[in-house]
Image (cartoon, rainbow, N blue to C red):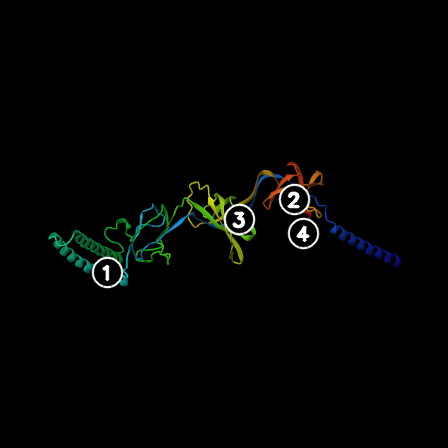
Amino acid sequence: MKKGFTITILITIALVFFGALYYLYAKNQAPPIVFETDKTEVKTIIKNTIATGNIVPDEEVLIKPNISGIIEAVYIKAGQNIKAGDLIAKIRVVANVSNLSTSQNQVQSDKIALDNQEKVFLRQKTLYDKGVISANDYDAAQLAYKQAKQNYAASKQGFDIVKTGTSSGLGNYANTLIRSTVNGMVLDVPVKVGNQVIESNNFNEGTTIASVADVGRMIFVGKIDESEVGKIKEKLPIEITIGAIENKKFDAVLQYIAPKGKTENGAIQFEIKASLDNRENTFIRAGLSANASIILEKAEKVLALKESLIQFDKKTQKPYVEVENGAQKFVRKDIILGVSDGIYVEIKSGLKASDKLKIWNQGLKIEENKS
């Protein structure tokens, strides 16, 4: 009786043990992977690099005075279109005391000389009329008198210029009236009535009274990293996107690449410039931030494939894909690649549009999810 009971217990333990082993085995058995497939697509692939910058006028002219003084009147405002010769501002000259004193003394000296030459001339004229002196002596006295009158007039005019910045008879040449030198739009007027301005000369660039530019000729000015500058060259096509103008792209052409880079935040940056082609009557304000997509290579309407479907031979590093030729049966096909944008790549040869391609990394994803 006891022997039969013991055997029953041992059999029960054995069944439980083998049942547990089978359960663990069955639990660890992964279901077979069913690979999904994908197809090629016809796409336009663009390989590009991005540069950030701003939209600025091609030529911006800074209007500066050629005389120092105080702004007495401003006749323009930002956003106004003006022509060359239009009046911009008027300056009131603040006379230099030293120069004013020197000019005043010169006027007095020339007046004394004129009075003296006038007396000499009148005396010589009387003698000439009586036939006492020759015509040469009379002509010399007359010439000296005229020169003294001219010197006196010039010194008076110089005194007026030092005192007021202009003089009668100068007309449009009066330098207290500041005029535009170009046609365009006024971008900025950094001065106001009452501000003091400094003349532009060899030692000082002078105070800017207004900046004027042709807003119909705008360019992109940006920076590109040294790692990308070797990939670009002049005359490459560019697509410009401006943050303030939504849903619009502007075509441009790369015109300039700086021959020397500058260090900014620890990185070497090179300046680039590009001229905008298709404005489409869109008003673009100077200084707007923009991004430039420089097109390095472009393949239009070509057979393309997702890069994630491509595998590389471990020995030769040549690209290949696995093409379905039956239910969950795949064969290897070597391919030749073309232009890539990082997501899609051009297939130059090796595939047909009807081929179904194995998503080979699907099994890796399932294992990652398990872990």
| 284 sits to left or right of 337 | left
* Mark 4 burial class by Cα count in 10 Å: few <14, some 14-19, many 20+: few
Question: As shown in the figure, which amino acid type bears the numbered disc 4?
Answer: Glu
Give coordinates of residue 182: x percent, y percent: 36, 47
CB under 8 Å between callouts 4 and 3?
no
* Mark 1 burial class by Cα count in 10 Å: few <14, some 14-19, many 20+: some
Question: As shown in the figure, which amino acid type bears the numbered disc 1?
Answer: Gln
Question: As shown in the figure, which amino acid type bears the numbered disc 2?
Answer: Leu
Give coordinates of residue 361: x percent, y percent: 67, 47
Mark 4 secondary-structure assignment:
helix
Give the residue number, with chain letter if any, for mark 4.
368
Label 3, label 2: how many angstroms apart (C-alpha)?
Answer: 26 Å
* Mark 3 burial class by Cα count in 10 Å: few <14, some 14-19, many 20+: some
**Residue 328 appears in the picture as rendered:** no
Give the residue number, with chain letter if any, for mark 2.
309
- Residues 360 and 125: in front is 125
Give coordinates of residue 224: x percent, y percent: 52, 51
Label 1, label 3: how many angstroms apart (C-alpha)?
Answer: 67 Å
Mark 1 secondary-structure assignment:
helix
Q: Earlier in the sequence, mark 3 or mark 2?
A: 3
Give the residue number, with chain letter if any, for mark 1.
106
Q: Earlier in the sequence, mark 4 or mark 1?
A: 1
Label 4, label 3: how many angstroms apart (C-alpha)?
Answer: 34 Å
| 257 sits to left or right of 200 | right
* Mark 2 burial class by Cα count in 10 Å: few <14, some 14-19, many 20+: some
Give the residue number, with chain letter if any, for mark 3.
50
Question: As shown in the figure, which amino acid type bears the numbered disc 3?
Answer: Ile
